[in-house]
Amino acid sequence: MKKIILGMAALAAVTAVSCSDKGSAENTANADKYSVPEATSDSVNSYFGSFVGTSILGEYSRLDSAMQAKQPKSDIVKGIQYVLGAPESEGVAVGMQIGLQMLNNLQRMEELGIKPDRNAIVNSFKKAFLADSTDMDAARGAQMAYQEMMGRIQRENKEFEDAKKANAPEAVANTEAGEKYLAEARAKDPSIKVSESGLAYKIENAGDTAKITRRDIAQIKYTGRLVDGTVFDSSEDARLSPAGVVPGFGEGLEMLGKGGKATLYIPGKLAYGVDGAPRAGIGPNAMLIFDIEVLDVNPGRK
């Protein structure tokens, strides 16, 4: 969610307001604390409010109409009045800061489909905060339970979104095209094998008996293409680690040693998945075919 943010540099610029009143230092020479003349204070107050209002309006004007509808000017003014109109108490100020931090969490909850009950949250906060002593076991338990539940909800949310993307027409078409391509390729060439993960591969030369490991850096030559023959990437001298590439590519590298050559048929689930890689022209769940040759292997740290 895009929010209006006034930078600290912009606020700092307010201090450049000049004050023409004279004698303020002399009038407070015997006081414990320097006192700004009332007329100067009035000017600073007016300039500060005007400057911030104009700056916020500039940012507000850049929001689209839908976002402006969610954040009407009247609500923004109401929020500022609420904060600035609060009692001049350090405790209240601290409470507001904590509340604003908690509000960010509530917004994240809503994005994940959770329905925040603000009264319930405040009541739980009060019960814990107003206790006579800190129950560290209860605190740790509540924190762990919260983190575990939020983690589970985030995973379920991602699974839900991924399922939606996987059922989108383009993703379904790409999956079917990949399956058809591989079936036809295997019918023509029985030497193409399929691993338990679903990676299909044809090894022309396994290379040295010492195979590439997850920590190694392999110096390779490769060409990557789509099932329609479109070449989306290639290199004559790339240095890659199995741990730093898509799962199917990494699995294929670990089958080879120096001098190895192979063709990998990587299904979408082992490549860029339902999100694809739009900048590279790779659609959701698109199968990738790589011809690779291992030129050298630099052992990683043990």
Image (cartoon, rainbow, N blue to C red):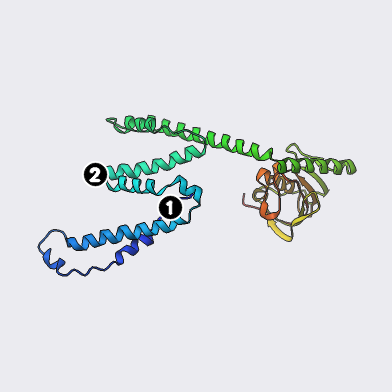
Residue 220 drawn at (x, y percent) = 74, 57
Residue 72 drawn at (x, y percent) = 42, 47
Quadrant of the rendered image containing residue 17: bottom left
Q: Which mark is residue 43?
A: none
Q: Is residue 221 above or below residue 144?
A: below
- In front of the other: 155 or 193: 155
Task: Please name the residue shown 50% across and 52% down the image.
Answer: 64
Task: Please name the residue shown 17% across and 62% down the image.
Answer: 37
Horizontal side, residue 93 vs residue 212: left or right:
left
Q: Residues within 10 Å of mark 1 (few under 14, many from 20)?
A: some
Q: Is residue 121 above or below residue 82?
A: above
Location of mark 1 (residue): 4
Task: Please name the residue shown 31% across and 47% down the image.
Answer: 81
Q: Secondary structure at mark 2?
A: loop
Residue kind at label 1, given as amino acid type: Ile
Residue kind at label 2, given as amino acid type: Pro
Q: Is residue 138 above or below residue 302?
A: above
Residue 255 drawn at (x, y percent) = 75, 46
Residue sitting farthest toward the right: 188
Give yes or no for contact between labels 2 and 1 (Cβ–Cβ under 8 Å): no
Location of mark 2 (residue): 87
Residue 188 drawn at (x, y percent) = 90, 43
Is residue 295 visible in the rendered image? The answer is no
Horizontal side, residue 110 vs residue 216: left or right:
left
Q: CA distance from mark 2 to mark 1?
A: 25 Å
